[in-house]
Image: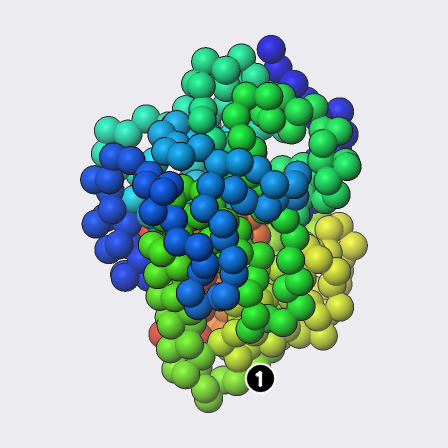
């Protein structure tokens, strides 16, 4: 049986220490739910053992989940970062971009050799029978309309949500206030929620603390660039799609002292859609430009051809940042598709490489 949502999908959306911790935890065979602490030490969030408050209300958690289905890429990122492997994934933004595997390209190095992760389909081909055959005992999904609707009532009416809720406990993190870029962000909160559900809140908090330390170090190293402007855009054949400063990448740039240009600051969450034309390249003028073509790894030739088209556009080539080499070509799956912890570490590395080391091409390798 294949279900579809019956609605148009919305256009939304390595730190060494973190990687080391993931490797150290890779041999864990069980998730010790009974050992889940009652609070997240650095963020002062109360998590009661055995339950979690979600978009869909309070959900009772299994004591020892062994077969976890991840919906969207965020919980996959968290599980692999914790050294755990989901039994299956679905609704991946990477697969949507032309891939045919269960995890996005940037997460493949974190999948243990020999591990098998099934894919249960996405917005157009969700396979309930495959989910039933997998027999998950816990389902972790992303919120903020990455998977389903924003309100509890609308989400509960989603046939995909209804199907999953009948199979296993479904955890979609509730929304939180993220207006302060230095405050707790949704990707961080979701990571802690999923870590709690897996019985590994302390380990998840440690990963978050390491990521915050890495951010602070980069901000210090970029002190001489504080206040400089940036823009992050996804090139498409017909228009440049500019990411909002309220999006994941804009928040990380602000945390290290780089602000958005005037246009990026005006773009509503999550991005500009098709509102710009190829004749409006002047809107992309900034001290630093991050070009984020969104293709799977197998589509490298198409990606390079599209970037070349922009570079050959006289309006784009004349932008001061392009003339001065103040730009970076980065992975659009991460910069305009991901919203999670490992992705954040990679983005910080990209920012460092582009601004401090002058490394323009961050994807060819």
User: Which residue appears at 54% of the width and 21% of the height?
Assistant: 167
Can the viewer see residue 202 in this picture? yes
Residue 21 position, x and y percent, is: 26, 54
Residue 126 position, x and y percent, is: 59, 22
- Viewed as shown, does residue 97 lie left or right of 4? left
Colour pattern of the rendering: rainbow
Examine the rendered structure and indicate whether residue 118 appears above or below residue 182: above
- Viewed as shown, does residue 278 lie left or right of 221? right
Closer to the camera, 74 or 322?
74
The quarter holding residue 212 reads bottom left
Can the viewer see residue 77 in this picture? no
User: Which residue appears at 75% of the width and 24% of the height?
Assistant: 6
* Number of marks: 1
User: Which residue appears at 75% of the width and 43% of the height?
Assistant: 151
The quarter holding residue 285 reads bottom right
Closer to the camera, 314 or 284?
284
Near mark 1 (Cα within 10 A), the count class, few <14, some 14-19 or many ≥20, is some
Examine the rendered structure and indicate whether residue 176 appears above or below residue 74: below
User: Which residue appears at 57% of the width and 17% of the height?
Assistant: 128
Residue 213 position, x and y percent, is: 38, 72
Residue that carries the numbered disc 1 in the rendered image = 227
Examine the rendered structure and indicate whether residue 94 appears above or below residue 168: below
């Amino acid at each position: 049986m294949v279900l579809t949502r019956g609605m148009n999908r919305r256009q939304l959306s390595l730190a060494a220490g973190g990687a080391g911790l993931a490797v150290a935890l890779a041999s864990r065979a069980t998730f010790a739910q009974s050992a889940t602490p009652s609070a997240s030490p650095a963020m002062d969030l109360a998590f009661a053992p055995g339950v979690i408050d979600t978009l869909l209300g309070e959900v009772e958690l299994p004591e020892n989940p062994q077969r976890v289905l991840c919906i969207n890429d965020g919980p996959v990122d968290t599980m692999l970062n914790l050294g755990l492997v989901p039994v299956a994934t679905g609704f991946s933004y990477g697969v949507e971009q032309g891939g045919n595997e269960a995890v996005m390209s940037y997460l493949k190095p974190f999948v243990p050799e020999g591990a098998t992760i099934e894919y249960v389909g996405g917005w157009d081909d969700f396979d309930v029978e495959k989910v039933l055959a997998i027999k998950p005992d816990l389902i972790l999904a992303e919120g903020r309309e990455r998977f389903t609707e924003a309100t509890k009532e609308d989400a509960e009416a989603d046939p995909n949500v209804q199907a999953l809720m009948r199979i296993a406990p479904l955890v979609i993190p509730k929304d939180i206030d993220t207006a302060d870029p230095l405050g707790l962000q949704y990707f961080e909160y979701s990571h802690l929620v999923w870590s709690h559900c897996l019985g590994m809140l302390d380990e998840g908090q440690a990963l978050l603390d390491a990521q915050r330390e890495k951010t602070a170090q980069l901000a210090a190293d970029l002190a001489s660039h504080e206040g400089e402007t940036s823009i992050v855009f996804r090139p498409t054949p017909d228009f440049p799609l500019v990411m909002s400063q309220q999006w994941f990448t804009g928040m990380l740039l602000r945390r290290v002292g780089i602000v958005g240009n005037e246009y990026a600051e005006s773009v509503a969450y999550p991005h500009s859609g098709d509102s710009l034309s190829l004749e409006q390249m002047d809107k992309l003028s900034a001290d630093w430009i991050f070009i984020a073509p969104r293709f799977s790894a197998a589509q490298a030739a198409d990606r390079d051809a599209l970037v070349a088209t922009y570079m050959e556009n006289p309006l784009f080539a004349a932008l001061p940042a392009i003339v001065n080499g103040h730009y970076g070509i980065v992975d659009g799956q991460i910069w305009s598709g991901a919203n999670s912890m490992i992705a954040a570490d990679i983005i910080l590395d990209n920012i460092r490489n582009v601004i401090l080391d002058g490394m323009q091409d961050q994807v060819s390798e």
